[in-house]
Image (cartoon, rainbow, N blue to C red):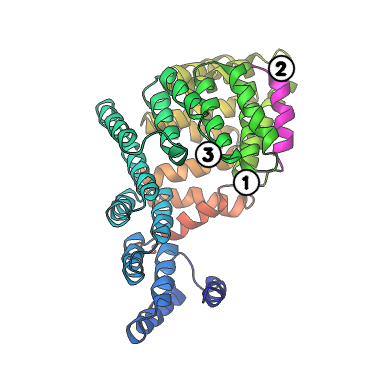
Amino acid sequence: GKTSKSNILRSIDDFVSEEPENQNNILLKKVLLERAQKNPDILWNELLSWLFEKQNQYGSAFRQEKAIFKRMNGSSTSRLENLGQSALENEEYEIAKDIYSYIIENTSDKIVQLDAELNLIDIELVGATDSTLDVIQKKYEELVDIYGYRSQTLQLQVAYANFLTFKKNDPAPAEKLLKNSLELPMSDRGTAYLKLALGDILVFNKKFNEALIYFSQIQQKLKNDVLGQNARFKVAQTSFYKGDFDWALTQLKVLRSSTSQLIANDAMQLSLLISDNSLEDSTQTALKKYARADFLAYQNKNDEAINALGDILENHKGEKIEDEALLKQAQLYEKLKKYDDAQLNYQKIITFYGNGILADDAYYALGELYRTVFNDPIKAKEQYEKIIYNYQDSYYFPEARKNFRILRGDSIN
């Protein structure tokens, strides 16, 4: 039963690692394969799948999940969906594509099919060019024709509205679409989900005050829910873009104890950015410039944002905002595939602001660059090592440790 499986997982989780070469991992895999051959119980497939996923071997996990799916006569795709999501989050796009395509072919559940189709589009959007964007827009239109605008297809409406706004720079039809969607019958969480997306689009279109109304409504309605906390963060962020720094700080103070680690981390970063740069400069000149650059980046006007940050680096040398501007500019350089410029910025943060709060961000980003772009595992390992030994409480610590172990020579897949 389920209890025995969860007990087994709890017991073995302490003894295996993400490294396939680990002796315990090898032993467990051997035992599970033997058991699966002797006694065709689905439990052995589930445990093998769990082990392969833990080791980032998504192809092997997918094979086990297909076997489980067939043994259960295709009664549920939820395990396959979870594996697809995990592969997507780990940027294993090819195998994620295979998983979602398999789901589409093997389910008759329309909503499951739609979710898989949307995930396939997300994969296509990674590194999409202008010509592929036109093809993707046609795909969205086809999905709208098939699935329609209904209470059950909110995820399609939000995905399409976000695509029109953030990829095609066309917020007006997106705003209209979501305002129409709000007329559909739905739960409080469904309404919140739509209003969050609508607020984002209004912000993109500089309709800050209208966006703040929607975000505040969600915040009041779902106070202790992660959607409510997300809305509060968006109130702070929008106020920041407007230059209303005091109100942004008020919201961020509440969020620093958020149950979501990501929201708490983002809230802390933004609140320190505002408070640090208000003490030093009562006119908040540099902070206003940074907020403008940050907003340009939000609108995907990356070249303009890079220039605006360049102005800060030129005219506010030695001020506290400098490391923030270097980091933001580096992230935008990466988006534009200007990796050498990004690398230089991260190095500057480490050299001049090695004791500052962004040093771990710079080490981690540099590690990722060396690992994924420059293909220099030795230098990548050095960056991750800095985080492992000097920044144990860093948000990046778990990923840095995982990547360090992989680079230490443990084979994957």
Q: CA distance from mark 2 to mark 1?
A: 30 Å
**Which three-letter amino acid code belongs to the residue tagged 2?**
Asp
State the residue position of label 2.
281
Q: Residue 389 in the image: x percent, y percent? A: 59, 54
Q: Residues within 10 Å of mark 2 (few under 14, many from 20)?
A: few
The x and y percentages for residue 266 are 61, 37
Identify the residue shown where x is 42% and y is 61%: 79
Q: Nearer the viewer, mark 3 or mark 1?
A: 1
Q: Residues within 10 Å of mark 3 (few under 14, many from 20)?
A: many
Above or below, comparing residue 70 to residue 37 in the picture: above
Q: Which numbered disc covers residue 163?
A: none
Question: Where does the C terminus fall, quadrant-wise?
Answer: bottom left
Asked if residue 400 lies left or right of residue 391, the reply is: left
Residue at label 3?
362
- Number of other residues with Cα within 10 Å of mark 1, as a class: few under 14, some 14 to 19, many 20 or more: few
Residue 252 among magenta residues: yes
Q: As displayed, is residue 50 above or below residue 288?
A: below
Measure the alpha-carbon separation of dots 3 and 1: 19 Å
Describe the element under mark 1 as helix, strand or loop.
helix
The mark that comes first in sequence, 2 or 1, is: 1
Most frequent secondary structure within the magenta stretch: helix
Q: Residue furthest front?
A: 185
Q: Is residue 346 left or right of residue 276?
A: left
Residue 216: say if magenta.
no
Element carrying mark 3: helix
Give the labeled residue for mark 1: 261
Going by the numbered disc 3, the residue's amino acid type is Ala
Within the image, what quadrant is residue 78 found in? Answer: bottom left
Residue 318 seen? no
Mark before the other along the chain sequence, 3 or 1: 1
Residue type at the position of mark 1: Gln
Q: What range of the chain is rendered magenta?
A: 243-257
